[in-house]
Amino acid sequence: MPEATPAGRRLGRGSVALLVGLQLLLVASVLAGLYFSGQHLRGVALDHMRSHAQVQTHNLEDSLTQSFNLLDMHLRALVVEHPEIQYAEQGVAPRDLEKALTALQNKLPYVRSLSVLERSGRVLASTQAANIGQQPGLEPLLPRVAPHTPGVLRFGAPWRGRDFADGSPWPATPGPGEVPDARDAGFFPITLVLPEAPQWTIVVAINSDYFINQALNHEVSPALRHQLYADNGTLLLSTAEDDLPGSVLDGARLAAVLERQVGVAQWPGPRGDAWLVAFRASRNYPWFVQSQASSTQVLQPWRRDMRQLALLAGLTLLLVLLTTGALTWRVYRSLQREERRLEENRLAASVFAHSNDFIVITDRQGRIVTVNPAFERGTGFSAAEATGCLPGHLSPSHPVPAHFDAMWAAMATEGAWQGEVIDWRKDGTPLTGWLTVNAIRDSAGRVVNYVGVLHDLSRLRADEATIRKLSLAVEQSPTSIVITSTAPAIEYANPHFFHTTGYTPAEVLGANPRVLQSGQTSQATYEAMWAELVAGRVWQGEFVNRRKSGELYIENATIAPLVDDQGRITHYLGIKQDITAAKEAEKALRLAASVVANTHEGVMVCDAAQRIIEVNPAFTRITGYTATEVLGRKPSLLSSGRRSREQYPAMWRALNQHGHWQGEFWNRHKDGSLYAAASTINALRDADGQVTHYVSVFSDITERKHQQEQLERLAHFDPLTGLPNRALLADRLQQGLARAQRARQGLAVCFMDLDGFKAVNDAHGHDAGDDLLAEVARRLQGSIRAGDTAARLGGDEFVLLLGGLHHPRECEDTARRVLHAVALPIEVEGHTVHVSASMGISVFQRDGCEAEQLLRQADQAMYQAKQRGRNRYVLYAPGMAEAAPGRV
């Protein structure tokens, strides 16, 4: 059977290949038939369109020729019917000419207007009154003959619009920004000079829409468009809206039409398609008719039919392929099953002959039919000795093993059995093994044979105890243990290794140990390791590896080569300990020490008894005390004594309740100078919640304090005079009003403006003006009481707040004193100048006035003082009628 298998396999595969080839041939035949049929139908569609275009071109040319012949005949009959035309003088239209033209136009539906031109080109008479007086430009006219040549119909370029009065010639190319409306078919002129009246030129405006509609009414294919071209290539009319009258046909195409007169052609289209063209030149006139269609539009029905045909053919082909494919698949599966069966038989024979397990085959009565070579080697009994015997009865001197009765009982009910058995070799030594027995049945389900496979467990049982101890030691080791081949490839790793790295056995077993590398271990470390291992020595060191999650970890590794009896290295044993936590702790301690040592803030650590046990260099720089001078002492040695009574209790409450406090101290430097410190104090507690240490982190903010005071002064005082500014004045005015209301006393607001300040400023400069203002400020402060306020609002405006008044007139003495002091001569920039002041006074008398109202009233009173001659004060009163000015 094994020898016949290759031939049968080739025959089966050849049959399947033949069926598949026939299917492919069918597909190719259908596709080829579709292709050639489609090409034939495509050619028929194109030929049909060409023939149709020729017929339509002939019909359109014949219709146009007859129409123009009829026009020519009626025009020539004008002289016969109206002989007075030939005798009319130049520039004078015959009386009945317009009636005759109107009657003629009514006979010809394709004529929009009939006009008569004199030799200057001006319209003398027309069926359209708007045309009279127009001088239309008709050049060029075809055919090209001498002007006023009689008896020839001449065709002009197309016009847009309804007639000459409201129209204009179509441009050959639209101008910049011009978007012509192609739906306006317009008209084109025809001229005729009658031999009997050569002084006149009859101009006919031909309605293009008439011939377009006539062509469309007789058209059966929407893809076809008809065009009328003059012999110079100018488009006169077209049934397509996207064709612009006046456009010029390509020179090569025009030459081909004029040369052949009648025929068909195929020209490339603007979108990559082709135009099927039929053309026919007029027999009598200088124009030709052209009918054309895009191949894309012509072939649309063909494409639709081909898609339907392809869909029908595809469905039919699919059905055939599914049917033949199903048959082919059944044949293929049948051949596969046969090949598998033959392969199984071959493998079974190979396993039987080469297996290390003992294999016994019996008949259905349980007698041995054959045994494999391993059975002979392992038991000592030859195949001849075992054949015909019952299993377990080969050694007559030993009893039959007790498990055989249970085995045959299970085989009778279940058809299979397995378990551990003890039998005897030929030499009398015991044989321990794991026996598996299965029943072999025929197609009818009847047992024909039994196959028993015995795996020898004798040596395994002897080594089992030792292996169990070693396994427990390795599996439960708190360190990672890895065994690799010399390749190297990981062959074993204990559970702690997988717990440490995060990998599963399937992910690392068989992989190179470099799967753990992070790239942060130096190459020199690996080179030193391999140098030791290759030399047969043990290597110890550290790796920075990466877990499966991407997290880095550090491990201390001891790697040793494993050597066989011949001294060859067969494996490497690695014992590794994760020391990441220890390294991180060590790093954190170093970092903390470095941060404390290098920070710019002072750090002071105290024990639970509030004695200093550690300081950093910044502490010495800020306080002036060295570590030797403060260790063991309390932080109170830094105190300056400038603490409020509430500061210490609040600090201890925050530390006891929240574990931290933040605030500012004024401390004293070792040299005795004071400095401001912004401090943060934290209480450190142990696991039981007891305070073990206090850590204070502080920085010197003395300069910031001084800057803050300077900013506050700039915010509330005028930088030139040193007097309070508007903001501080408003605050003091509010406070003065509150005091006046509580004490039931008066308050006066004096608004003062300098007289003559601008003249000093203009004459001597701004520096002199600044000196003048500073001197006035000093005189104001010297003229008021200590509890009063002098403020500068800006420029040369000042305000005085006078409090503690018992009578409104009490402020007048101060006002006179101030005005007198201001009026005294002042030295500025080496010059003596004189200024005075005008002052308005508003008095608060517990009448509910607001601060802004007092200032406004004082300002109004000051303007009254200005108007009354300056250098005076005025008390505010309603209406200012009763105010009595006082002079200095």
Image (cartoon, rainbow, N blue to C red):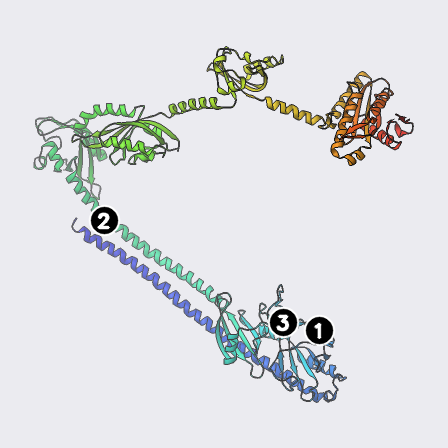
In the image, which is nearer the foreground, mark 1 or mark 2?
1
Q: CA distance from mark 2 to mark 3?
A: 86 Å
Secondary structure state at the residue bearing disc 1: loop
Q: Name which quarter of the figure residue 506 lies in.
A: top left
Q: Which residue is mark 1?
A: 165
- Residue at 73 percent of width and 87 percent of height: 85
Query: Which one is earlier in the sequence, the residue at label 1 or at label 2?
Result: 1
Secondary structure state at the residue bearing disc 2: helix
Q: CA distance from mark 3 to mark 1?
A: 15 Å
Q: Nearer the viewer, residue 686 or 663?
A: 663
The answer to whether mark 2 and mark 3 are in CB contact below 8 A is: no
| Crowd class of label 1 (few under 14; some 14 to 19; many from 20; radius 10 Å) | some
Q: Which residue is mark 3?
A: 170
Q: Which residue is mark 2?
A: 339
| Crowd class of label 2 (few under 14; some 14 to 19; many from 20; radius 10 Å) | some
In the image, which is nearer the foreground, mark 2 or mark 3?
3
